[in-house]
Amino acid sequence: MGATHSLLGRRLAVTLSRPQHIHSAEPVSTPANLLACLQPGDVLLVEGNSRVSADIKFLTQSTWSQAALFVGNCLAQAGGNPAHCFIEADMVEGVRSVGIAEFANLNTRICRPFGLSALDCKQVAEFAIRRIGNQYDLRNVLDLARYFLPNPPIPLRFRRLMLSLGSGDPTRAICSTLIAQTFQAVRYPILPTISTRSADNPDCPGCMEEIYKIRHHSLFTPKDFDVSPYFQIVKPAQISGFNFRDLKWEDIHGR
């Protein structure tokens, strides 16, 4: 039964990952502009153009359906393809490295973690690089396939769970699951559960302290990096020294 599910999941993955036409604005950042401002440890959110991307965007009520981790030249230093600088989990090929050309015609957003040192970022990158070759969770594909209706009757509070029904095997990555694991490896928060308790301080009997609890990596979606208070949204125009006065506008009357 497991082999049958795996074969069916792979066939679905090939079909559902094929690009399709979507009505979307033209990408506002060129690959060159993206590369100029990316740093190791950055998460690149992507508005995918496949059928499964449309479903993920519906379930998460978000523009973003895919996430990739920028590792810079860490991959080349580890003996990988020097033209590749991202790690992502692909439905068909599993965890792989890709270059900037993979996202050339898609809308993207850069999410940068606050406060990570260069060493922390290197550890995050190396953790992801070691996962290259792991397979995508094909059981998750089968679960998602139930919801490929135009308007599936799923209450909003249950939609996140629809993306966490996979095998639970940590060697079978989903795009946002893989990246969540890399940050959890250095105990960096994304959207943790926060509770309070007594600080147990004799000098301050009424003092309380916050306790952070890591959420299971299977519960993360690309949208979470966008809304996380621990990730900064970086836009290439901000980095390049944009000045609106330098723009040359076409005159509406053709003059």
Image: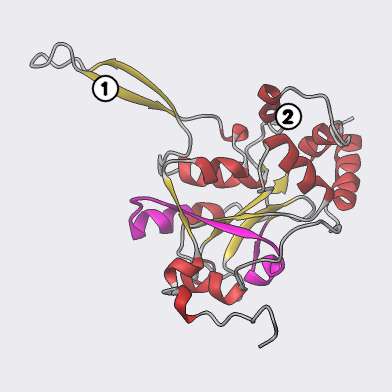
What span is colored magenta in the figure? 96-124
> Could you tell whether 11 is left or right of 166 in the image?
right
Q: Position of residue 64 (x, y in %)?
A: 66, 48
At a point 69% along the width and 48% down the height, the residue shown is 65
Residue type for callout 2: Met
Front position in the image: 10 or 23:
23
Callout 2: 10 Å neighbours few (<14), some, many (20+)?
some
Q: Position of residue 120 (x, y in %)?
A: 37, 53
Q: What number of labels is visible? A: 2
Position of residue 138 relative to residue 14, above or below, is: above
**Residue at the farthest bottom position:** 255
The magenta stretch spans residue 189: no
Provide residue 5's location: percent of width, then percent of height.
88, 35
Where does label 1 land, which residue?
Answer: 209
Task: Specify whether residue 100 is painted magenta.
Answer: yes
**Among numbered discs 2 and 1, the one appearing first in the sequence:** 2
Q: Check disc 2 and report the residue beneath it.
A: 162
